[in-house]
Amino acid sequence: MAEEKTGNPEQYTSQGILKTVFSRLKRNENLYLAFTNPKVVFGISLFSAVLLFALLGPYFTEYGINEFAGIGSPASRAAPSGEHPFGLTMQGYDVFTRTVHGLRATILVGFVGGLIASFIGLIIGLIAGYRGGMVDEFLMGLTNVFLTFPQLPILIVVAAYLPYRGIIHMAVLVGLVIWPWTARAVRSQTMSLKNEEHVALSRISANSTPRILIEDIAANMFSYIFMVFILQYMGTIMATVGLEFLGLGPTRGVSLGLVMQHAVQSGALYLGYWWWGILPGLFLMLMIFSLYFLNTGMDEVFNPELREL
Amino acid sequence: MMNSKPQEGLLSVRNLSKIFYSGIINREKTVGAKNVSFDLEPGKIISLIGESGSGKTTVGKLILKLLQPTEGEIYFRGQDITNLTSKKEKKRYYSKVQGVFQDPFSSFNSLFRVDRIFNMIFRIFMPEVGKSEQEDRILEAIREVNLTPDLLEKYPHQLSGGQLQRLLIARALLLDVDVLIADELISMLDASTRMGVLNLLLDICQEKGMAILFITHDLNLGYYLSDTTLIMYEGRLVERGGTRKIYENPVHPYTKMLFESVPGVEERWDRDEDFVPEEIDKIVREFYDNHEGQGFSEVEEAHHVLFSEQKID
Amino acid sequence: MGKYFGKKLIIYIITFFIAVTINWLAPRFIPGDPVTSLLAQYQGPAAGRQMLETRLRTLFGLEGSLIQQYINFWANLLRGDLGRSILQFPREVSEIVKNNIIYDIAVLLPAISLSWIVGNKIGAMAGENEKIDRYIMPLFYGFVSSPYFWFAIIVVFVFAHSLGWFPTARAYGAGVRPAFTLNFIIVFLRHWFLPFFTMFLVGLGQWSIGMRNMVIYEIESNYANYLRSLGARQKLIRNYAFRNGVLPQVTGLAIQLGQIVSGAITVQVVFDYPGLGRLMYQAVQQQDFFVLQGAFLSLILMVLAANFLIDIIYMFIDPRIRLSYSEEE
């Protein structure tokens, strides 16, 4: 009982803070609103469906990604059938298998890349927003420069020279290019939060700046950071798929963009192999679609003005 | 009231100025505070009175080192603390000088329980103090502000503004500070709670011998609380002196206007034809022009007025 | 006002500088250098190899110290010399780029402008009209969630393959030579349409969504409520809401240019349609490094120029910029 009165120091470790934020969220009415918002529900459901598809898909097929599964031409023979729900490629590979495995690779790159981008953007945004002055000007200048770059061309130019492109390489590369958006968003939030009096109180308590940034500022924009991460993830995936489509994806294995590149290269478009070109991309589209809804829904929850009455 | 030697006082402010610049290429200047000087003494409450934009909050922030002055010095116990760099020095300063702000709800990080502010104090300033000793001290501080220990487990949104402000005062007591900067401490509290908190301030000022800078826009409060009054207008200190003296004999036109514009509770609406608040700026300029060269000078003992602007720019 | 442009120009110059540097730096990242990897394919006598190596080193600018190479690179760039294509040696890269950039502009300029204008209109309508919002917005969300090239693939299948209305690829048929004849123009337009249509639709979705959100936000704002309480007609309020909502859309356009151009690259590959995008793609496939460099730099220049253009336009429509420039970001 005596413990309770003064709180426990563990509360202020990083796990402690995370625990506090989550327990606070549990009691939070916003969370309730979030889970009853139709957009959020729809978004989460669809996203989970795609995710499940990617995770479990490989168990539903007996073919390898580069394994000959049947004769792939003419198109009528390669069309989707009971045995090959997504049809065959011209070379005779099973499209379902390749889609499912490719989706995994793409999701992985997107996720890691998104984390990297969010992390970089978060740190830069926090520092720029909190410090202000020359530091802010410099960091924002840097951010603006990166923002002006068209992403794919830069990625192409660097990726073209990499001798080996592993999944992690890709993730890091993409993450390093698309962080600016996060930095900007985090910075503006930081700038409004830093004027709150609890930040001043922390300062006159001689609290260390990293702790202030984490406890007083970042922790108070948790929902915002989450939404930002989702958007970054979407951006990373789009960029990754683009690279893959141009033949600059992971060197080994199969990826979603690569499957579609093969389709286009093989002239699938002329010959009518629509399942080969369209189906793999469909899942990507669905995933991003779901995330848009999730994000819009969450935006409505946290910014009541946008709610439809 | 003013020591000629700032080294002898508790906390002294000399020629303190803060200019805000906006933008990097086209630097626009805003004067936050200009040439402000006064002393804080133990056991005395000083009111800093002004409207929004007068610079009173800026002065508070400068003393609390939330802002860095562009000119001037701040002395604490004889030491010039205007430019503190090391963490240790800052900690030492904050262990003796603290503040309480206007918005009680904004002063607490809503994600944490209210006792976080106390734990922060121990963690940073007194890490050597043992757990049970910490509890005792916190309970003691709570008692002194007339609160009960069960509040400690609550979250900020579960408490009232008055309770939160008391907790913030308790925090300062925990540190046993010598100087407390109270910035619009009660403006966001209901009328009924205000007196409680104000009286608390008076009590601790007397009992602990704390120096309190009470920043407010409310003249009545200033009169109720303080021995010395400072009046600020447009970043400048325009009148300074014993509270009684100023209230009975305001000299600066802005001070006069302040007194004119306070509706008394007993009075009814009564238009004073001579008095037009919108023209105060013009009136002040005229006043300065008429008294050119007199600067900040004595009107009577312990009563100074700004008669003209010194040409510093 | 001058400061507004000054600041933007500095950013653009720095951006270009960094882009050029990355461009220059990238080939030097590969272990070994591009010359060695090219030489690995050489099958002839040793003496010839020596000559080739020297020649290649000169061509690549790989002689002299690193600083020297860098300066040379810039010197050439400022002269407009983007090097020569390795594959189509000795054809100049700048010439190849010039031929391609026309197609980029032909597709992108109308696609971007039209989709922005029409998209804003539709978005504004959706902001007010529940029905439009409910039925059209999800469709547009679908558009926006699609990778550009995937969308292009669908467009090809539907309009070119199934319906046969348009050809599937290239800028003009195999046996046709470009000329200002009516015949050619028709052929050109037939081939041009689908790439244009793809870029148009995705952009349409994007701007509609953006504008819709803006309009909703504006309609609920204080000034709108105030006007309403004064008895202003909905049309007037809509007007104000629209004009205020357009501003961030213009900035949004500048920000999105990079994305759009990136998307255009992949679309060009799908349609095998000429342009800097397809050029870069082929250059990567064929390891024609100079073409890659040249195309990349031209692309960056194009984007920066477009950005600058938008900044100028923005200055005219946002009175705040004209009256007082203050960095509020």
Image (cartoon, rainbow, N blue to C red):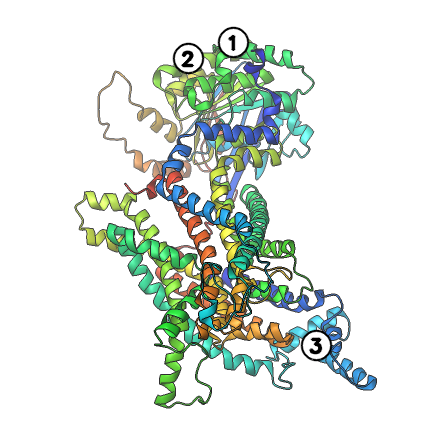
Q: Which residue is drawn at 55% across and 19% down?
A: B172
Local crowd size for mark 1, using a 10 Å CA cut-off: few (<14), some (14–19), many (≥20): few
Which type of secondary structure does the marked residue at label 3 adopt? helix
Q: Check disc 1 and report the residue beneath it.
A: B143
Asked where in the image residue C165 lies, by quadrant, the reply is bottom left
Name the front one of labels 1 and 3.
3
Q: In this rendered view, identify the residue nearer to me: C76 or A225.
A: A225
Q: Check disc 3 and report the residue beneath it.
A: C60
Local crowd size for mark 3, using a 10 Å CA cut-off: few (<14), some (14–19), many (≥20): some
Asked where in the image residue A294 lies, by quadrant, the reply is top left
Asked where in the image residue C253 lies, by quadrant, the reply is bottom left
Q: Check disc 2 and report the residue beneath it.
A: B196
Which type of secondary structure does the marked residue at label 1 adopt? helix
Q: What residue type is labelled 3?
A: Phe
Residue C303: where, in percent of width, then height?
Answer: 49, 67
Is residue B45 something that shows in the picture? no
Q: In this rendered view, identify the residue nearer to me: A297 or C26.
A: A297
Name the front one of labels 3 and 2.
3
Q: In this rendered view, identify the residue nearer to me: C181 or A91.
A: A91
Residue C123: where, in percent of width, then height?
Answer: 31, 56
Query: Is C194 on the left-hand or right-hand side of A148?
Result: left
Tag 1 near tag 3, CB within 8 Å: no
Query: Is A118 on the left-hand or right-hand side of C323?
Result: right
Which type of secondary structure does the marked residue at label 2 adopt? helix
Q: What residue type is labelled 1?
A: Arg
Question: Which chain does the residue under circle 3 lie in?
Answer: C
Q: Residue at x 59, y 21 (%)?
A: B119
* CA distance separating discs 3 and 2: 82 Å
Question: Which chain does the residue under circle 2 lie in?
Answer: B
Q: Which amino acid does label 2 sit on?
A: Gly
